[in-house]
Image (cartoon, rainbow, N blue to C red):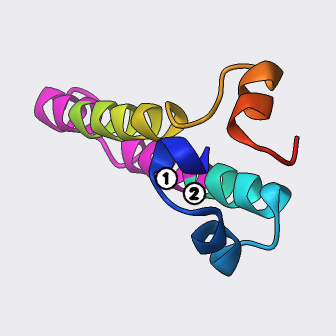
């Protein structure tokens, strides 16, 4: 993952104590962002198509940003082994 993100292992471990902590941080960021977006939909009044369209646009942008982040993760266990000499 560090290779795909174009950062060094030392940089990653400066901020995270290990792979589990990094994974938890990524998951927490995704969950927080999604929760915030879903809370916003509750404020959209029924029949307000403009506000709904804006929410959908914001949600799509968030989803695409998260997809780009997830693209850095290996697809398989073999991919993890190929990326990490410690595997």
Residue 12 part of the magenta-drawn span: no
Residue 31 part of the magenta-drawn span: yes
Taking the image as shown, residue 72 lies to the left or right of residue 46, namely: right
Q: Please give the range of residues in magenta.
A: 30-56
Question: Would you identify the image quadrant in which residue 78 lies?
Answer: top right
Q: Secondary structure at mark 1?
A: helix
Q: Residues within 10 Å of mark 1 (few under 14, many from 20)?
A: some
Q: Residue at x 43, y 47 (%)?
A: 37
What is the distance, in whole Å, between disc 2 and disc 1 at their CAs? 6 Å
Q: Which mark is residue 33?
A: 1
Of 32 and 46, nearer the camera is 32
Quadrant of image for the C terminus: top right
Question: Which SS does the magenta portion mostly show?
Answer: helix
Tag 2 residue: 29
Of 26 and 3, nearer the camera is 3
The residue most toward the left is: 50
Q: Which mark is residue 64?
A: none
The residue most toward the front is: 85
Of 37 and 63, nearer the camera is 63
Taking the image as shown, residue 17 lies to the left or right of residue 58, namely: right
Q: Are marks 2 and 1 in contact (CB under 8 Å)?
A: yes
Nearer to us: label 2 or label 1 = 2
Q: Residue at x 67, y 49 (%)?
A: 27
| Coordinates of residue 45 in the picture (x, y in percent) | 28, 39
| Coordinates of residue 11 in the picture (x, y in percent) | 58, 72
Taking the image as shown, residue 32 lies to the left or right of residue 86, namely: left
Quadrant of image for the N terminus: top right
Q: Residue at x 35, y 49 (%)?
A: 43
| Coordinates of residue 4 in the picture (x, y in percent) | 50, 41
């Amino acid at each position: 993952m560090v290779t795909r993100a174009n950062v060094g292992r030392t940089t990653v471990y400066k901020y995270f104590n290990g792979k589990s902590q990094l994974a938890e941080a990524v998951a927490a960021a995704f969950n927080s962002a999604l929760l915030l977006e879903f809370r916003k939909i509750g404020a959209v009044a029924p029949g307000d198509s403009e506000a709904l369209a804006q929410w959908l646009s914001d949600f799509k942008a968030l989803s695409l940003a998260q997809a780009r982040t997830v693209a850095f993760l290996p697809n398989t266990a073999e991919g993890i082994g190929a990326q990490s000499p410690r595997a």
